[in-house]
Amino acid sequence: MQFFLQQCLIGITNGALVALVALGYTMVYGIIRLINFAHGDLIMLGACLALSLVSAFGMGGGGMATTWLGVALLVVLCGLFCGGLNVVVDRIVYRPLRNAPKLAPLVSAIGVSFIFMNVGLFWLGPSDRSFPELLPATNLLAGEGLQFTAKDLLVLVVVVPLMLALSLLVKSTRLGKAMRAVSQDPAAAALVGIDVDRVIAFTFFVGGFLGGAASVIYGLYINTIGFQMGFQNGLYAFTAAVLGGIGSIPGAVVGGLVIGLVRSLSSAYVGERWTGAIVFAILIVILVFRPEGLLGRGTREKV
Amino acid sequence: MTGQHHTTRDATGAVPLRDRVLAFVRERWDLVALVVLAVAPLVVPALGGALGGQVTTLFIYCILALGLNVMVGYTGLVHLGIAAFFGIGAYLFAILTVPMYPFQMRFVTAAAVSVLATAGIGLALGAPTLRLRGDYLAIVTLGFGEVVKVTLRNLEQITGGMKGLNPVPPPGAGLTVGGINLGLAFAIDPRWFYYLALVTLAGVVVAMRRLEHSRLGRAWVAVREDELAASAMGISATRVKLSAFAMSSAVAGLAGCLYAASLSTTADPNAYDFNRSIMVLCAVILGGLGSIPGTLLGVALLVGFDTVLAPWADSAIQQWNINPSGSSLLSFSGWRLAIFGLALVLVMRYRPEGLVPSRRLAAELHEAHP
């Protein structure tokens, strides 16, 4: 029982991280129906920047307060970096293809993902790099039982406020309203005076910002980064987005948590090496039986 | 492709020989290429060595790409897991032939069985998923590819894990035809496999051409251009897409059989991963979706990049001593991914129909979408 609860706890922390990445997929898909293949590799680049910053400024010497402050700064910097990069890519690569057949942006996204991977290869080198352990692994819970370390706390401390801020942004601001309008019907949104391209760029920025934040947490939590990390993590996150219902923001969070739990439980009970197959098998089954996901609404194909 | 060339006439009104030859090459590029490739091993001694093996692999990738072209090019369904079917073909073929299993079938029987079985697996995956929207289908094929790779790697008792299955016997092992021990000949001289792959490729090209203009091939294109309109004309979109899925899988399976036989091993499961799928997709897109010469050219370019251009450029960089520090930034092959990625982005932006376009698809891609 204890073991099971521990695995669930690991799963929830992992899942929160997956959810943060999944939000980037779901928001971009929601607004321009593009599976942004490069999102995972964008996060890899964010992790590269985080590692470079940490190595350059040698964090870890100071006390607890400075460390947390440094982490907060890292989250903001990497978030801005990934968000900005996402906007630039949208402007250069995807925007000219807005009216092209669907295949074009999808294939371009695969191309962008290759380019990002190559940049990461130059940045990190071909082998995996270890990310410094800035946060102590001491248990914050009393007693012998469950392990809940500062690292786990970090994930929740970063993820939960970001998600709250995001839902506030989408639900209660003018820009959020514009985002929802564009996602429903870009042509109609343009007719009522919404600058569609700007709203799309903003969506790319927000998705990228969340991805940048996720990259810092990934580095601090998993402690190993490599230029190929983007592909698999991106796929897990995409699975989470589809599972929750792609285009739905609460769906991405729920999907992320479910994927996190599935991963930790299958690693514990079936074997680590089967985890990938199990996650993707779930993806296929969900797509076949409930393509709209857990919380998504079915979309009808328009003629 | 035909009927577009202009020949110049000289003063007497006769077409100069050079132009006539050029016109012939342009019109019957396939025949010319086939003759050149068929004669090459007799003239170029290097094809009897390692180079022969490399060209054989090139032919096999051409077959694989032609299989993918059925789905992506003709039918317009994005498939991101073709390597999985390549792998399934290779592993089934190996299981049916290697000494550690009781089947030990003949080459042709084993190939036929594994091609049919691969098509069946394609049908089994396609039947429930084909009603999905295009990009979801892409993800299903991608996920399937990952599941297959992980399964091949982990089911060590059946697939040999990372070692793969070997030794896969050469075609005609133990058969003697006209005083030649076929199995031995295949094992010693790579030119036997060269011809086997070339003949198979030629067969696939002919079959694809016939298919393209058949009732089924036209139905594929109709579904790609407008599924709704095609259904309104009485075409069952689901059945047409399923047949494309099965055909793609079967051809990929055939390529897998040849691959396993020519290497005499299935190699490790990583040979059938997402990267392989994407490279084949790149080749088809770069060369020209739905275009047979385009697909072949795309594969030749991509394989040529890896086996000819990149090593040549790397050694040139070394020779000219541009890169004394050995930095990976200054090695040509270090930029491989970025070059492929950039090629994809640029092709999609400026020439989505590829280098040797199918005229029909080019028109479709340049149509203004509302």
Image (cartoon, grey):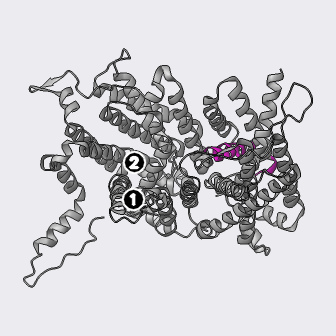
Give how far across and how far down residue B291 sits, in percent. Answer: 38, 57
Queried whether the magenta region covers residue B330, the answer comes back as: no
State the quadrant of the C terminus of chain B.
Answer: bottom right
In the picture of the structure, the residue carrying the numbered disc 1 is B287
Q: Locate residue B348, reporting x and y percent.
A: 51, 64
Magenta stretch encompasses residue A242:
yes
**Mostly what secondary structure, the magenta segment?**
helix
Taking depth in this image into account, of A141 and A94 the one nearest to the observer is A141
Q: Are marks 1 and 2 in contact (CB under 8 Å)?
A: yes
Rendered view: B45 above or below B152? below
Q: Residue at x 83, y 20 (%)?
A: A1
Mark 1 vs 2, N-terminal side: 2
- Residue A242 vs B89, above or below: the answer is below
B142 vs B208, left or right, is right
Indicate left or right for A87 with A145 as reference: left
Give the numbered dot on residue B65. Answer: 2
Q: Residue at x 49, y 36 (%)?
A: B122
Which chain contains the residue that carries disc 1?
Answer: B
